[in-house]
Image (cartoon, rainbow, N blue to C red):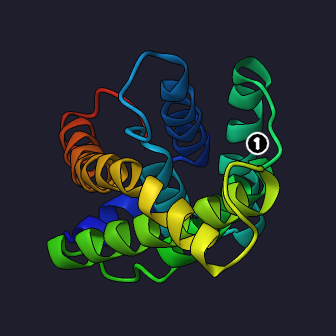
Amino acid sequence: MSITMTLSKMNPAWVIGVIILLAMFRLVPHPPNATPIAAMALFSGAVFSNRALAYLVPLAAMWLSDLVLGLHATIWYVYAGVAITVLIGSALQNITIFRVGAVAFLASIVFYLLTNFGAWLHHDMYPQNATGLLQAYVAGLPFLRNALLANLMFAYLVFYGLAWLKSVFSSSRSIPN
């Protein structure tokens, strides 16, 4: 059985629980931008056949964690990045090691471009010209590095770890599908 088949047969309530758990990871101490948010959104896009749920669940989970962390001027850029990452995840028709890495990399770049653009546009720390935009992108490079490493690690962990757990529990009949 392929990993795609294993993940597609997951109980939707269990998938929602995994997504909420991943979003709540933002509430524990972590290096800047080293959270499983991209993995959460990629997983949601890849696993939910219901497109509305694929977007609604991770965005609602983000909103819940943001109620604790606080709202900010650039939050809509973050949410747009999550929504685009769900879209990218929906392209994972056949899950392979290369494809999971490629979508995690792409999601990292898209999120970096969107959120740093938002920081440049909505904060007065950069001049509102091409030089200021470039400064915003350069200042975000350390965060991009953390995000790339975390997104790759969490994406592999979520896709392959959950598929492995699903196969273990399915074969032992310990929990229902």
SS class of the residue under badge 1?
helix
Residue 136 against residue 63 in the figure, above or below: below
Is residue 54 visible to the viewer in this orientation of the structure? no
Q: Residue at left 37%, top 57%? A: 141
Question: In the displayed structure, does residue 96 sit left or right of residue 106?
Answer: left
Residue 84 against residue 158 in the figure, above or below: below
* Quadrant of the image occupied by residue 117: bottom right
Which residue in the protein does label 1 denote?
60
Q: Specify the amino acid type for callout 1.
A: Ala
Q: Residue at left 63%, top 80%? A: 130
The answer to which of 20 and 118 lies nearer the viewer is 118
Residue 154 against residue 107 in the figure, above or below: above
Q: Residue at left 67%, top 57%? A: 126
Q: Position of residue 33 (x, y in %)?
A: 44, 41
The answer to which of 176 and 108 lies nearer the viewer is 108
* Quadrant of the image occupied by residue 48: bottom right
Is residue 36 visible to the viewer in this orientation of the structure? yes
Q: Position of residue 72 (x, y in %)?
A: 80, 37
The answer to which of 69 and 123 lies nearer the viewer is 123
Mark 1 crowdedness (10 Å alpha carbons): few <14, some 14-19, many ≥20: some
Question: In the displayed structure, does residue 156 sit left or right of residue 62?
Answer: left
Question: In the displayed structure, does residue 144 sit left or right of residue 11?
Answer: left
Residue 28 against residue 84 in the figure, above or below: above
